[in-house]
Image (spheres, helix red, strand yellow):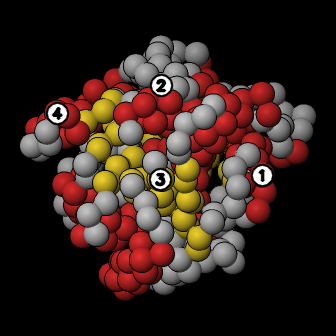
């Protein structure tokens, strides 16, 4: 059996790494299995640095489709063309696509048109906001998929409610947790917290939030007010740093630092007093680490992080943001648990299903 694994952005590699480890291990044990790792972007993409693959202990991609453009529709068309050409050269049994990117949807469409078995990681996630481009991508990918690998019961329910056949749906767990558990002992304490024992972490990535100047100003003010005595370590990309830096007071607890490697960021978040983020992936890892997490969104694709885990949704409610930070500092934050099958064996279940 040959598997084609497709990544469309940096976070996809973190989720695909456990499948690569499991595939290599199965082949060593005599299974007739192989894989090809494809990146839809270019080899020079600065967001996919060399040490990411070293830290994840996976090889570099075998194939770069080389598509890099701002227009979502143009990107979709170019990825479709490039992946169609790839399928002319490789005989693959199964194509595994990850998450909800435009490039993921493009690969899914081509795979089905070419008669390939299509598997989706992570299926059944919904924001229920059809105005979000990613929501459209999710609906299309899940609708085309032969195998839907879900992270929890809620995703199973969504897939079933939308008419997916039961024999297509496999609740396998969360691949991020596989990667987290495998690397936990290898996490590296970053220099930015030298001499600091107690701190919050702040990450912001969504362009819609970053471009909302009024929201950013209110958020910064709320964090400065409640976390005044506790450092807030903020490894921000340039666009977010540019939006936040001018708003910081002289005594601000927010400390903007350079982006961290996977192993450094893993240490930073797993040892934090609390996390403030707009990232679903960060919230999922926080749930496994039982670290209090405040999500700056009104929704989450993984409701388990809220109903069972350590996540709280505050959206644009800065008063709720302040009170939740205060609860964390006071030790009054809610108790949390780890969702079912978030146990680090997701990749094994996926290979068994295949």
Q: Which residue is mark 1?
A: 54
Residue drawn at point x = 32 percent, y = 65 percent: 111
Q: Position of residue 312 (x, y in %)?
A: 42, 32
Camera-side mark, 2 or 1? 1
Could you give the CA–CA distance between mark 3 and mark 4, rounded to whole angstroms?
A: 23 Å
Mark with earlier residue (2, 1): 1
Kindly state the secondary structure of the residue where label 1 is placed.
Answer: helix
Q: Which residue is mark 3?
A: 3
Residue 344 to residue 118: above or below: above
Classify the position of the C terminus by image quarter.
top left
Front-most of residues 62 and 205: 62
Q: Position of residue 322 (x, y in %)?
A: 49, 36
Q: Which residue is mark 4?
A: 166
Q: Is residue 230 visible?
A: no
Front-most of residues 273 and 27: 27
Camera-side mark, 3 or 4? 3
Tell me whether the residue at label 4 lies in contact with that at label 2, contact meaning CB atoms closer than 8 angstroms.
Answer: no
Could you give the CA–CA distance between mark 3 and mark 2, rounded to whole angstroms?
A: 24 Å
């Amino acid at each position: 059996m040959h598997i084609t694994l497709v990544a469309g952005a940096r976070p996809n590699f973190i989720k695909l790494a456990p499948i690569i480890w499991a595939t290599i291990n199965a082949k060593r044990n005599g299974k007739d299995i192989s894989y090809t790792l494809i990146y839809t972007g270019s080899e020079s993409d600065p967001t996919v640095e060399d040490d990411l693959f070293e830290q994840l202990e996976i090889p570099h991609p075998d194939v770069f489709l080389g598509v890099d453009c701002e227009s979502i529709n143009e990107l979709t068309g170019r990825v479709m063309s490039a992946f169609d050409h790839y399928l002319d050269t490789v005989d693959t049994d199964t194509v595994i696509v990850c998450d909800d990117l435009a490039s993921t949807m493009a690969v899914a469409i081509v795979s089905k048109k070419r008669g390939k078995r299509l598997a989706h990681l992570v299926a059944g996630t919904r924001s229920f906001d059809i105005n979000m481009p990613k929501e459209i991508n999710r609906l299309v990918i899940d609708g085309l998929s032969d195998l839907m690998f879900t992270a929890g019961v809620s995703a199973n329910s969504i897939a079933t409610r939308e008419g997916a056949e039961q024999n297509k749906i496999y609740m396998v767990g969360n691949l991020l947790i596989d990667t987290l558990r495998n690397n936990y002992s290898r996490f590296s304490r970053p220099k930015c917290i030298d001499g600091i024992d107690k701190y919050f972490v702040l990450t912001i990535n969504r362009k819609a939030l970053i471009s909302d100047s009024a929201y950013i100003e209110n958020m910064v003010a709320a964090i400065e007010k409640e976390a005044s005595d506790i450092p807030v370590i903020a490894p921000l990309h340039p666009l977010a740093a540019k939006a936040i830096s001018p708003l910081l007071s002289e005594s601000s607890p927010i400390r903007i630092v350079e982006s961290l490697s996977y192993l450094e960021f893993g240490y930073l978040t797993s040892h934090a007093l609390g996390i403030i983020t707009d990232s679903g992936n960060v919230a999922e890892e926080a749930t496994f680490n039982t670290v209090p997490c405040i999500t700056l969104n009104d929704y989450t694709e993984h409701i388990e992080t809220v109903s069972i885990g350590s996540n709280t949704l505050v959206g644009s409610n800065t008063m709720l943001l302040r009170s939740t930070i205060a609860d964390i500092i006071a030790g009054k934050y809610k108790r949390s648990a780890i969702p079912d099958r978030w146990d680090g064996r997701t990749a094994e279940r996926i290979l068994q299903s295949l």
